[in-house]
DNA sequence: GTAATTCCTCAAGTTCACTTTAGATCAAGC
DNA sequence: GCTTGATCTAAAGTGAACTTGAGGAATTAC
Protein backbone atom coordinates (compact mmCIF):
# COMPACT_ATOMS: atom_id res chain seq x y z
CA UNK A 1 0.00 0.00 0.00
CA UNK A 2 2.36 2.65 -1.27
CA UNK A 3 1.94 6.20 -0.08
CA UNK A 4 1.29 7.54 -3.56
CA UNK A 5 -1.86 5.48 -3.94
CA UNK A 6 -3.19 1.94 -3.88
CA UNK A 7 -1.34 -0.84 -5.65
CA UNK A 8 -3.08 -3.30 -7.87
CA UNK A 9 -2.67 -5.87 -5.14
CA UNK A 10 -4.40 -3.60 -2.67
CA UNK A 11 -7.31 -3.27 -5.05
CA UNK A 12 -7.42 -7.01 -5.55
CA UNK A 13 -7.49 -7.57 -1.79
CA UNK A 14 -10.23 -5.05 -1.25
CA UNK A 15 -12.48 -5.95 -4.15
CA UNK A 16 -11.89 -9.67 -4.28
CA UNK A 17 -11.00 -9.40 -7.94
CA UNK A 18 -7.92 -11.09 -9.36
CA UNK A 19 -5.02 -8.84 -10.22
CA UNK A 20 -5.26 -10.04 -13.79
CA UNK A 21 -8.92 -9.11 -13.90
CA UNK A 22 -8.17 -5.56 -12.78
CA UNK A 23 -5.57 -5.19 -15.50
CA UNK A 24 -8.07 -6.60 -17.94
CA UNK A 25 -10.66 -4.06 -16.84
CA UNK A 26 -8.14 -1.34 -17.43
CA UNK A 27 -7.91 -2.33 -21.08
CA UNK A 28 -11.67 -1.83 -21.19
CA UNK A 29 -11.50 1.63 -19.72
CA UNK A 30 -13.08 0.85 -16.39
CA UNK A 31 -10.12 2.08 -14.36
CA UNK A 32 -7.37 4.49 -15.33
CA UNK A 33 -4.41 4.09 -12.98
CA UNK A 34 -1.40 6.35 -13.09
CA UNK A 35 2.12 4.97 -13.05
CA UNK A 36 4.79 5.53 -10.43
CA UNK A 37 8.50 5.97 -11.14
CA UNK A 38 9.02 2.25 -11.54
CA UNK A 39 6.14 1.80 -13.94
CA UNK A 40 3.78 0.25 -11.42
CA UNK A 41 0.09 1.12 -11.41
CA UNK A 42 -1.19 3.37 -8.66
CA UNK A 43 -4.88 3.72 -7.95
CA UNK A 44 -7.06 6.11 -6.02
CA UNK A 45 -10.10 5.40 -3.89
CA UNK A 46 -12.36 6.36 -6.75
CA UNK A 47 -11.01 3.31 -8.56
CA UNK A 48 -12.37 1.11 -5.78
CA UNK A 49 -15.75 2.65 -6.43
CA UNK A 50 -15.49 2.16 -10.12
CA UNK A 51 -14.56 -1.48 -9.73
CA UNK A 52 -17.32 -2.02 -7.20
CA UNK A 53 -19.80 -0.59 -9.57
CA UNK A 54 -18.53 -2.71 -12.43
CA UNK A 55 -18.82 -5.83 -10.28
CA UNK A 56 -22.36 -4.98 -9.28
CA UNK A 57 -23.33 -4.24 -12.83
CA UNK A 58 -21.94 -7.56 -13.95
CA UNK A 59 -23.90 -9.25 -11.25
CA UNK A 60 -26.95 -7.60 -12.72
CA UNK A 61 -26.11 -9.16 -16.05
CA UNK A 62 -24.54 -6.26 -17.87
CA UNK A 63 -21.75 -7.00 -20.31
CA UNK A 64 -18.43 -5.34 -19.66
CA UNK A 65 -18.71 -3.37 -22.86
CA UNK A 66 -22.01 -1.90 -21.70
CA UNK A 67 -20.59 -1.09 -18.30
CA UNK A 68 -17.62 0.59 -19.90
CA UNK A 69 -19.95 2.55 -22.15
CA UNK A 70 -21.89 3.82 -19.15
CA UNK A 71 -18.78 4.65 -17.19
CA UNK A 72 -17.19 6.45 -20.10
CA UNK A 73 -19.42 9.37 -19.24
CA UNK A 74 -18.00 9.59 -15.75
CA UNK A 75 -14.90 11.56 -14.86
CA UNK A 76 -11.94 9.22 -15.07
CA UNK A 77 -9.87 10.36 -12.15
CA UNK A 78 -12.34 11.19 -9.48
CA UNK A 79 -15.21 9.52 -7.78
CA UNK A 80 -18.42 9.77 -9.78
CA UNK A 81 -21.03 12.07 -8.38
CA UNK A 82 -24.19 10.99 -6.68
CA UNK A 83 -26.19 11.92 -9.74
CA UNK A 84 -23.92 9.83 -11.91
CA UNK A 85 -24.66 6.76 -9.83
CA UNK A 86 -28.32 7.60 -9.70
CA UNK A 87 -28.57 7.82 -13.44
CA UNK A 88 -26.83 4.52 -14.04
CA UNK A 89 -28.46 2.59 -11.26
CA UNK A 90 -31.89 3.79 -12.33
CA UNK A 91 -31.24 2.49 -15.82
CA UNK A 92 -30.18 -0.80 -14.32
CA UNK A 93 -33.29 -1.02 -12.26
CA UNK A 94 -35.38 -0.85 -15.40
CA UNK A 95 -33.37 -3.63 -16.88
CA UNK A 96 -33.89 -5.83 -13.85
CA UNK A 97 -37.62 -5.18 -13.94
CA UNK A 98 -37.70 -6.25 -17.55
CA UNK A 99 -35.83 -9.43 -16.87
CA UNK A 100 -38.07 -10.32 -13.95
CA UNK A 101 -41.15 -9.79 -16.07
CA UNK A 102 -39.78 -11.98 -18.81
CA UNK A 103 -38.90 -14.76 -16.44
CA UNK A 104 -42.37 -14.57 -14.94
CA UNK A 105 -43.98 -14.88 -18.33
CA UNK A 106 -41.78 -17.84 -19.04
CA UNK A 107 -42.65 -19.43 -15.73
CA UNK A 108 -46.35 -19.03 -16.37
CA UNK A 109 -46.00 -20.61 -19.77
CA UNK A 110 -44.03 -23.46 -18.32
CA UNK A 111 -46.80 -24.00 -15.77
CA UNK A 112 -49.17 -24.50 -18.64
CA UNK A 113 -46.79 -26.92 -20.28
CA UNK A 114 -45.67 -29.08 -17.40
CA UNK A 115 -47.30 -32.41 -17.83
CA UNK A 116 -48.63 -31.75 -21.28
CA UNK A 117 -45.53 -33.08 -22.97
CA UNK A 118 -46.52 -31.59 -26.26
CA UNK A 119 -43.61 -29.39 -27.18
CA UNK A 120 -45.18 -29.09 -30.56
CA UNK A 121 -43.51 -26.69 -32.90
CA UNK A 122 -46.88 -25.59 -34.10
CA UNK A 123 -48.78 -25.13 -30.89
CA UNK A 124 -46.50 -25.07 -27.86
CA UNK A 125 -46.67 -21.73 -26.13
CA UNK A 126 -43.20 -22.21 -24.75
CA UNK A 127 -41.72 -22.77 -28.10
CA UNK A 128 -43.62 -20.01 -29.80
CA UNK A 129 -43.11 -17.09 -27.50
CA UNK A 130 -44.78 -13.82 -28.27
CA UNK A 131 -41.92 -11.98 -26.76
CA UNK A 132 -38.17 -12.04 -26.63
CA UNK A 133 -35.93 -12.43 -23.66
CA UNK A 134 -33.42 -9.65 -23.24
CA UNK A 135 -29.82 -10.70 -23.51
CA UNK A 136 -28.99 -12.45 -20.28
CA UNK A 137 -25.39 -11.47 -20.28
CA UNK A 138 -22.16 -11.80 -22.14
CA UNK A 139 -21.22 -14.53 -24.50
CA UNK A 140 -22.65 -15.86 -27.68
CA UNK A 141 -26.18 -15.93 -26.38
CA UNK A 142 -28.48 -15.96 -29.34
CA UNK A 143 -32.18 -15.57 -28.86
CA UNK A 144 -35.16 -17.42 -30.16
CA UNK A 145 -38.36 -16.09 -31.47
CA UNK A 146 -37.30 -13.08 -33.43
CA UNK B 1 -37.37 -34.04 -47.07
CA UNK B 2 -36.29 -37.53 -47.96
CA UNK B 3 -38.70 -40.38 -47.49
CA UNK B 4 -36.43 -42.13 -45.04
CA UNK B 5 -36.61 -39.25 -42.57
CA UNK B 6 -35.97 -35.56 -42.23
CA UNK B 7 -32.78 -34.02 -43.56
CA UNK B 8 -30.69 -31.65 -41.52
CA UNK B 9 -31.99 -28.84 -43.69
CA UNK B 10 -35.57 -29.81 -42.88
CA UNK B 11 -34.76 -29.63 -39.21
CA UNK B 12 -33.10 -26.27 -39.66
CA UNK B 13 -36.13 -24.94 -41.49
CA UNK B 14 -38.54 -26.19 -38.89
CA UNK B 15 -36.61 -25.22 -35.77
CA UNK B 16 -35.02 -22.03 -36.98
CA UNK B 17 -31.62 -23.35 -35.99
CA UNK B 18 -28.64 -23.16 -38.31
CA UNK B 19 -27.55 -26.39 -39.91
CA UNK B 20 -24.17 -25.96 -38.27
CA UNK B 21 -25.82 -25.60 -34.89
CA UNK B 22 -27.70 -28.87 -35.32
CA UNK B 23 -24.50 -30.65 -36.19
CA UNK B 24 -22.89 -29.03 -33.18
CA UNK B 25 -25.71 -30.24 -30.95
CA UNK B 26 -25.15 -33.72 -32.25
CA UNK B 27 -21.60 -33.65 -30.97
CA UNK B 28 -23.11 -32.85 -27.59
CA UNK B 29 -25.48 -35.77 -27.70
CA UNK B 30 -28.70 -33.83 -28.07
CA UNK B 31 -29.72 -35.54 -31.30
CA UNK B 32 -28.65 -38.89 -32.69
CA UNK B 33 -29.38 -39.02 -36.41
CA UNK B 34 -28.91 -42.16 -38.49
CA UNK B 35 -27.11 -42.06 -41.82
CA UNK B 36 -28.52 -42.92 -45.23
CA UNK B 37 -26.66 -44.75 -47.98
CA UNK B 38 -24.81 -41.60 -49.04
CA UNK B 39 -23.72 -40.76 -45.53
CA UNK B 40 -26.26 -37.97 -45.01
CA UNK B 41 -27.97 -37.51 -41.67
CA UNK B 42 -31.58 -38.56 -41.38
CA UNK B 43 -33.74 -37.48 -38.48
CA UNK B 44 -37.06 -38.53 -37.02
CA UNK B 45 -39.81 -36.37 -35.57
CA UNK B 46 -38.56 -37.09 -32.07
CA UNK B 47 -35.46 -35.13 -33.00
CA UNK B 48 -37.61 -32.08 -33.62
CA UNK B 49 -38.91 -32.48 -30.09
CA UNK B 50 -35.47 -32.90 -28.68
CA UNK B 51 -34.20 -29.80 -30.42
CA UNK B 52 -37.25 -27.83 -29.37
CA UNK B 53 -36.69 -28.79 -25.82
CA UNK B 54 -33.01 -27.89 -26.00
CA UNK B 55 -33.89 -24.48 -27.42
CA UNK B 56 -36.41 -23.82 -24.70
CA UNK B 57 -34.02 -24.94 -22.02
CA UNK B 58 -31.38 -22.63 -23.37
CA UNK B 59 -33.86 -19.84 -23.32
CA UNK B 60 -34.35 -20.61 -19.67
CA UNK B 61 -30.65 -20.18 -19.12
CA UNK B 62 -29.48 -23.76 -19.02
CA UNK B 63 -26.07 -24.56 -20.40
CA UNK B 64 -25.90 -27.05 -23.22
CA UNK B 65 -23.94 -29.45 -21.07
CA UNK B 66 -26.71 -29.44 -18.49
CA UNK B 67 -29.36 -29.94 -21.15
CA UNK B 68 -27.41 -32.82 -22.59
CA UNK B 69 -27.06 -34.29 -19.13
CA UNK B 70 -30.82 -34.18 -18.59
CA UNK B 71 -31.58 -35.57 -22.03
CA UNK B 72 -29.08 -38.36 -21.64
CA UNK B 73 -31.68 -40.12 -19.53
CA UNK B 74 -34.19 -40.02 -22.35
CA UNK B 75 -34.42 -42.71 -25.02
CA UNK B 76 -32.30 -41.59 -27.94
CA UNK B 77 -34.38 -42.73 -30.85
CA UNK B 78 -37.91 -42.09 -29.83
CA UNK B 79 -39.92 -39.22 -28.53
CA UNK B 80 -39.53 -38.77 -24.79
CA UNK B 81 -42.53 -39.69 -22.73
CA UNK B 82 -44.85 -37.28 -21.06
CA UNK B 83 -43.35 -38.11 -17.69
CA UNK B 84 -39.87 -37.43 -19.04
CA UNK B 85 -40.86 -33.93 -20.04
CA UNK B 86 -42.70 -33.42 -16.81
CA UNK B 87 -39.69 -34.33 -14.75
CA UNK B 88 -37.35 -32.04 -16.66
CA UNK B 89 -39.70 -29.12 -16.99
CA UNK B 90 -40.55 -29.26 -13.31
CA UNK B 91 -36.87 -29.03 -12.47
CA UNK B 92 -36.62 -26.04 -14.76
CA UNK B 93 -39.51 -24.34 -13.13
CA UNK B 94 -37.69 -24.44 -9.83
CA UNK B 95 -34.70 -22.88 -11.44
CA UNK B 96 -36.76 -20.07 -12.88
CA UNK B 97 -38.37 -19.40 -9.53
CA UNK B 98 -34.96 -19.16 -7.96
CA UNK B 99 -33.73 -16.72 -10.55
CA UNK B 100 -36.81 -14.54 -10.19
CA UNK B 101 -36.40 -14.43 -6.44
CA UNK B 102 -32.77 -13.45 -6.76
CA UNK B 103 -33.49 -10.69 -9.21
CA UNK B 104 -36.22 -9.39 -6.93
CA UNK B 105 -33.86 -9.26 -3.99
CA UNK B 106 -31.38 -7.44 -6.13
CA UNK B 107 -33.99 -5.00 -7.30
CA UNK B 108 -35.04 -4.24 -3.76
CA UNK B 109 -31.47 -3.61 -2.76
CA UNK B 110 -30.96 -1.37 -5.73
CA UNK B 111 -34.04 0.60 -4.71
CA UNK B 112 -32.34 1.29 -1.43
CA UNK B 113 -29.18 2.36 -3.19
CA UNK B 114 -30.48 4.53 -5.98
CA UNK B 115 -29.61 8.04 -5.09
CA UNK B 116 -27.41 7.18 -2.17
CA UNK B 117 -24.29 7.01 -4.26
CA UNK B 118 -22.39 5.27 -1.54
CA UNK B 119 -21.18 2.08 -3.14
CA UNK B 120 -19.03 1.66 -0.12
CA UNK B 121 -17.22 -1.61 0.08
CA UNK B 122 -17.91 -1.72 3.78
CA UNK B 123 -21.54 -0.79 3.95
CA UNK B 124 -23.25 -1.00 0.58
CA UNK B 125 -25.94 -3.65 0.62
CA UNK B 126 -25.60 -4.14 -3.10
CA UNK B 127 -21.95 -4.81 -2.90
CA UNK B 128 -22.18 -7.03 0.13
CA UNK B 129 -24.94 -9.39 -0.73
CA UNK B 130 -26.04 -11.97 1.76
CA UNK B 131 -26.82 -14.35 -1.01
CA UNK B 132 -25.42 -15.52 -4.28
CA UNK B 133 -26.92 -15.33 -7.68
CA UNK B 134 -27.23 -18.65 -9.45
CA UNK B 135 -25.16 -18.97 -12.55
CA UNK B 136 -26.91 -16.97 -15.19
CA UNK B 137 -25.83 -19.18 -18.01
CA UNK B 138 -22.79 -20.44 -19.78
CA UNK B 139 -19.47 -18.74 -19.96
CA UNK B 140 -16.92 -17.58 -17.48
CA UNK B 141 -19.46 -16.02 -15.18
CA UNK B 142 -17.91 -15.76 -11.78
CA UNK B 143 -19.96 -14.71 -8.84
CA UNK B 144 -19.46 -12.20 -6.11
CA UNK B 145 -20.05 -12.63 -2.48
CA UNK B 146 -18.86 -16.11 -1.81
C1' DG C 1 -28.14 -35.87 -67.82
C1' DT C 2 -26.53 -32.00 -66.05
C1' DA C 3 -26.74 -27.97 -63.16
C1' DA C 4 -27.95 -26.27 -58.82
C1' DT C 5 -28.53 -27.25 -54.29
C1' DT C 6 -27.61 -29.58 -50.18
C1' DC C 7 -24.81 -32.16 -47.57
C1' DC C 8 -20.35 -34.16 -45.87
C1' DT C 9 -15.90 -33.64 -42.72
C1' DC C 10 -12.43 -31.30 -40.43
C1' DA C 11 -10.09 -27.37 -38.95
C1' DA C 12 -9.96 -22.95 -37.63
C1' DG C 13 -12.15 -18.59 -36.33
C1' DT C 14 -15.36 -15.70 -33.14
C1' DT C 15 -16.85 -13.37 -28.74
C1' DC C 16 -16.69 -12.65 -23.84
C1' DA C 17 -14.34 -12.44 -19.76
C1' DC C 18 -10.84 -13.67 -18.06
C1' DT C 19 -6.49 -16.68 -16.51
C1' DT C 20 -1.98 -18.51 -17.25
C1' DT C 21 2.72 -18.44 -18.46
C1' DA C 22 7.25 -16.60 -19.20
C1' DG C 23 10.75 -13.76 -18.51
C1' DA C 24 12.07 -9.60 -16.45
C1' DT C 25 11.87 -5.63 -13.21
C1' DC C 26 10.51 -3.21 -8.88
C1' DA C 27 9.62 -2.63 -3.92
C1' DA C 28 9.81 -4.00 0.90
C1' DG C 29 11.31 -6.38 5.02
C1' DC C 30 15.08 -7.60 7.82
C1' DG D 1 22.19 -5.13 0.71
C1' DC D 2 19.90 -8.92 -0.34
C1' DT D 3 16.19 -11.88 -0.71
C1' DT D 4 11.40 -12.49 -1.08
C1' DG D 5 7.33 -11.10 -2.97
C1' DA D 6 4.75 -8.02 -5.94
C1' DT D 7 4.45 -6.12 -10.32
C1' DC D 8 5.47 -5.46 -15.22
C1' DT D 9 4.43 -6.78 -20.47
C1' DA D 10 2.96 -9.62 -24.11
C1' DA D 11 1.12 -13.54 -25.81
C1' DA D 12 -1.33 -17.52 -25.52
C1' DG D 13 -4.88 -20.46 -23.36
C1' DT D 14 -9.84 -21.42 -21.61
C1' DG D 15 -14.71 -22.60 -22.26
C1' DA D 16 -19.20 -21.93 -24.05
C1' DA D 17 -21.72 -21.99 -28.14
C1' DC D 18 -21.42 -21.64 -32.32
C1' DT D 19 -19.98 -20.02 -37.32
C1' DT D 20 -17.05 -20.03 -41.33
C1' DG D 21 -14.27 -22.01 -44.83
C1' DA D 22 -12.18 -25.44 -47.80
C1' DG D 23 -12.65 -29.14 -50.66
C1' DG D 24 -15.49 -32.67 -52.10
C1' DA D 25 -19.58 -35.90 -52.61
C1' DA D 26 -24.70 -36.77 -52.67
C1' DT D 27 -29.32 -35.29 -53.94
C1' DT D 28 -32.78 -32.84 -56.33
C1' DA D 29 -34.85 -30.12 -59.95
C1' DC D 30 -35.53 -29.50 -64.62
Image (cartoon, coloured by chain):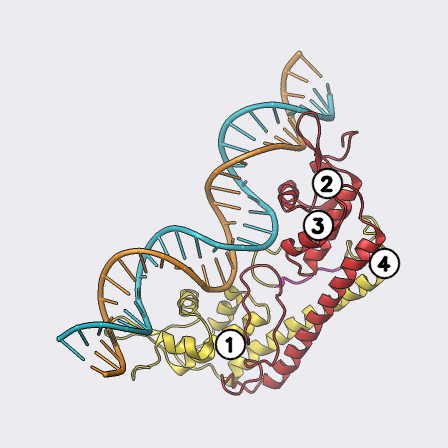
Chain colours: A yellow, B red, C orange, D cyan
Secondary structure found at label 1: helix
- Between the residue at mark 1 and the residue at mark 4, the CA separation in whole angstroms equals 43 Å
Q: Quadrant of the N terminus of chain A?
A: bottom left
- Above or below for A5 versus D20: below
Q: Which residue is mark 3?
A: B72
The residue shown at (40%, 70%) is A19
Left or right placement of residue A9 versus residue A144 in this view: left
Above or below: residue A109 compared with residue D4: above
In front here: A100 or B33? B33
Q: Which mark is residue A115?
A: 4
Q: Position of residue D28 (x, y in %)?
A: 73, 26
User: Cα distance, mark 3 to mark 1?
Assistant: 41 Å
Does the magenta stretch mainly form a helix, a strand or a loop?
loop
Q: Which residue is mark 2?
A: B11
Q: Earlier in the sequence, mark 1 or mark 4?
A: 1
Using the numbered discs, state the Cα–Cα distance from disc 3 to disc 2 in whole angstroms: 20 Å
Which residues, given as a range, are shown in magenta?
Answer: A131-136
Marks 3 and 1 belong to one chain:
no
| Chain-order first, disc 3 or disc 2 | 2
In the drawing, does residue B64 fall left or right of residue B146? right
Q: Could you tell me residue B114's position as x and y percent?
A: 59, 83
Q: Secondary structure at mark 2?
A: helix
Q: Horizontal placement of B32 versus C27: left or right?
A: right
Amino acid sequence: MAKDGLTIGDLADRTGLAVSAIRFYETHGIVHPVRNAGGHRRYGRHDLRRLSFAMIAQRLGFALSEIARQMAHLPAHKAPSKSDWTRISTAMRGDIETRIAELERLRDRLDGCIGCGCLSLETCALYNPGDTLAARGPGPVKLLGD
